[in-house]
Amino acid sequence: MTKIALVTGAGSGIGRATAQLLADRGFGVITTYHRNPADHVSLPLDVADTSTFPAFAAGVRSALQEHWQRDTLDYLVNNAGIGGPSPFQTTTDEAYERYHRTLLKGPFFLTQALLPLLNPQGAIVNVGSSSTRPGVTTPGYAAYAAMKGGMDMLTRYLAKELAPIRVNAVSPGPTRTNLGDGGFEKYPEFIPPIVAETTLDRLGESDDVGKAIAALLSDDLKWITGEVIEVSGGYKL
Ligand SMILES: NC(=O)c1ccc[n+]([C@@H]2O[C@H](COP(=O)([O-])OP(=O)(O)OC[C@H]3O[C@@H](n4cnc5c(N)ncnc54)[C@H](OP(=O)(O)O)[C@@H]3O)[C@@H](O)[C@H]2O)c1
């Protein structure tokens, strides 16, 4: 039977690459879009607004029926996110809340809302960040990394609580996407110093991370759960 995956934030970057890769491998794919429309079967979602999740879950249920005559999803990729620095001393309550609602509270309650649709033999991949790793403590990322650290911990606890659904996370290193309003495109001078600190000697691409996510979803890695795996080409190794 066709495996069906839902990928949040698939209008660009890592989410788009993951959705395309899964579709190319024969998965049924439901994507969500926020500002920029995505391909595939695509539903609007603001992951920062939990009040919309019951209606979103109902939309997923209808899409499963309409496109695959199914009642269940096999895979969930909690990818949607925002980035960019916010120095600790000037981070406002509002900015903190935005990171929290988008990067931690949203995925927490979205997973809860979609749980009744998830195949017990299925898998979840959360997208964290290498900013939580020892040695990758970049000034300006306290709020962002605190949320991503929460995501790592949530991954471990969900793996326990939702078993036999497998739950893992990837921690991408610097990856060429639109994150932080296209920071790498706007400020190409940021790239060489990052490459200089990356063991495999280049910037990450969305596809590098998408392939790792697809691998974690696949049965080849079915004995792995509760893990947070860095996908960074050895950034600051
Ligand atoms: N790129 C990196 O260097 C890097 C490193 C570590 C971790 N990550 C993580 O990777 C994930 C994907 O980011 P990316 O790098 O691929 O950046 P991206 O190209 O900016 O993609 C982010 C996606 O998330 C969506 N999104 C943002 N806010 C949303 C909201 N409130 N509700 C629903 N969707 C929302 C965006 O949709 P719209 O465009 O429609 O708003 C977009 O599709 C994020 O969780 C990010 O923290 C990225």
Image (cartoon, rainbow, N blue to C red):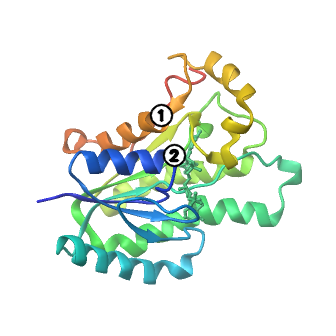
Task: Find residue 82 and report its horizontal and vertical position in percent.
Answer: 63, 54
Q: What amino acid type should be assigned to the residue bearing mark 1?
A: Glu
Q: Residue at x 68, y 47 (%)?
A: 180
Q: Quadrant of the N terminus?
A: bottom left
| Ligand 1 within 8 angstroms of badge 2 C-beta | yes
Residue with the most extreme right position: 89
Q: Quadrant of the C terminus?
A: top right
Q: Quadrant of residue 221?
A: top left
Task: Find residue 218 and report its horizontal and vertical position in percent.
Answer: 24, 45
Whether residue 129 is visible to the viewer of this picture, yes or no, is yes
In the image, 179: left or right of 64?
right
| Ligand 1 within 8 angstroms of badge 1 C-beta | no
- In the depicted structure, whether residue 172 falls above or below residue 64: above
In the image, 188: left or right of 37?
right
In the image, 100: left or right of 94?
left
Q: Residue at x 56, y 70 (%)?
A: 46
Residue 37 or 99: which is nearer the viewer?
37
Q: Residue at x 48, y 45 (%)?
A: 14
Mark 1 residue crowding within 10 angstroms, few (<14) / some (14–19) / many (20+): many
Q: Residue at x 74, y 60 (%)?
A: 96
- In the depicted structure, whether residue 87 falls above or below residue 212: below
Residue that mark 1 sits on: 230
For residue 13, the mark is 2
Task: Find residue 189 and report its horizontal and vertical position in percent.
Answer: 74, 26
Element type where label 1 sits in the image: strand
Mark 2 residue crowding within 10 angstroms, few (<14) / some (14–19) / many (20+): many
Q: Which comes before the other along the chain, label 2 or label 1?
A: 2
